[in-house]
Image: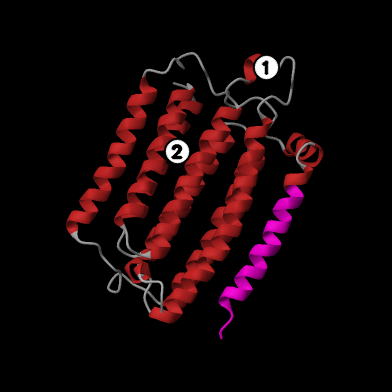
Amino acid sequence: MGITQILFWVLSILALLSAILVVISKNPVHSVLWLIAVFIAISGHYILLNAQFLAIVNLIVYAGAIMVLFLFVFMLMNLNSDTEPQKNKWLKIAGVVAGGSLLLVLVAALKQADMKNQLAEMNKGDIGLIKNLGMVLFQDYVVPFEISSVLFLSAMVGVVVIGKKD
Amino acid sequence: MPINYYIFLALALFCIGVAGVLTRRNAIIIFMCIELMLNAVNLLLVAFSKMHQHTLAVTNPNAGIDGQLFVFFIMVVAAAEVSVGLAIIVMMYRNTHSIDVNFLNRLKH
């Protein structure tokens, strides 16, 4: 088992454990911090798959910007685990059973799929480098790129309109 | 790494997100679970973008690059979605002094 496999398993276990802790922590701030751990683990997976640009963007945009936004909102609201609304026990069990059943069905459907010799290339290939991504983004995907800038503008206007006190 | 492992890892992350949406009542935690699901999909897209490379890269060096660009656009849309969603949640907190989603079942006042 090479270093790549070891890193894959370590990052997978880290991602899954942190994801479970996001869901079960009582304190919302701890949930945010565990979600940052999930994002760091997923960025590690991107690096293993040689998608360096996406790894860095994931860290900057998700762990850096979005999670800070979540933390700010939590701190503005001054919430803690005492004021945390709780569902009753049966609804929680039903939710976990529903999620587990979805996982079971999807795993059962995909278990028999013939993908044994399909490998995800690790540590090689240069499609994840910023030069190649940039060439394709600004040649073939210019229109979606511009549309996403319009989307950002409308989101910005929407946030200002929603957040305005009236 | 066989592609199966990535598929099952992404499925597990996605289903943890689904279970979180169904079990929690805090609106922001539900939102974070949606982010978790989006990230599971992103991870799977990146893994798939590297899947056929060893056969296709001979003729087309950019084979599979579309998957990574889709991930890029998903991140863009997620950032816009988070900003609008958090603004709505802050508005809701200002009106009801709670972020319990059960307060949202009557949208009138």
State the mark number for residue A164: none
Residue at mark 2 shares a chain with residue at mark 1: no
- Tag shown at residue A11: 2
**Crowding near the residue tagged with mark 1, few <14, some 14–19, many ≥20 C-alpha atoms within 10 Å:** few
- Mark 2 neighbour class, 10 Å CA radius: few under 14, some 14 to 19, many 20 or more: many
Q: Is residue A48 something that shows in the picture?
A: no
Q: Secondary structure at mark 2?
A: helix
**Most frequent secondary structure within the magenta stretch:** helix
Residue B11 position within the rendered picture, expressed as x and y whole percent measured from the top left: 41, 36
Q: Position of residue A135 (x, y in %)?
A: 80, 37
Q: Residue at x 77, y 40 (%)?
A: A134
- Residue drawn at (45%, 49%) of the image: B36
Image depth: mark 2 or mark 1 in front: 1
Image location of residue A60, percent across then percent down: 61, 53
Q: Amino acid at mark 2?
A: Leu
Residue at the front extreme, as displayed = B108
Chain assignment, label 2: A
* Farthest left residue in view: A90
In this rendering, is residue A50 above or below B96? above
Q: Which quadrant of the figure has residue A102?
A: top left
Horizontal and vertical percent position of residue A123: 60, 27
Checking the image for residue B56, the label placed there is 1
Question: Looking at numbered disc 1 in the image, what kind of residue is underneath it?
Answer: Leu
| Magenta span contains residue A161 | yes
Q: Secondary structure at mark 1?
A: helix
- Which quadrant, please, contains the N terminus of chain A? top left
* Foreground residue among A157 and A52: A157
- The magenta region covers A145-166
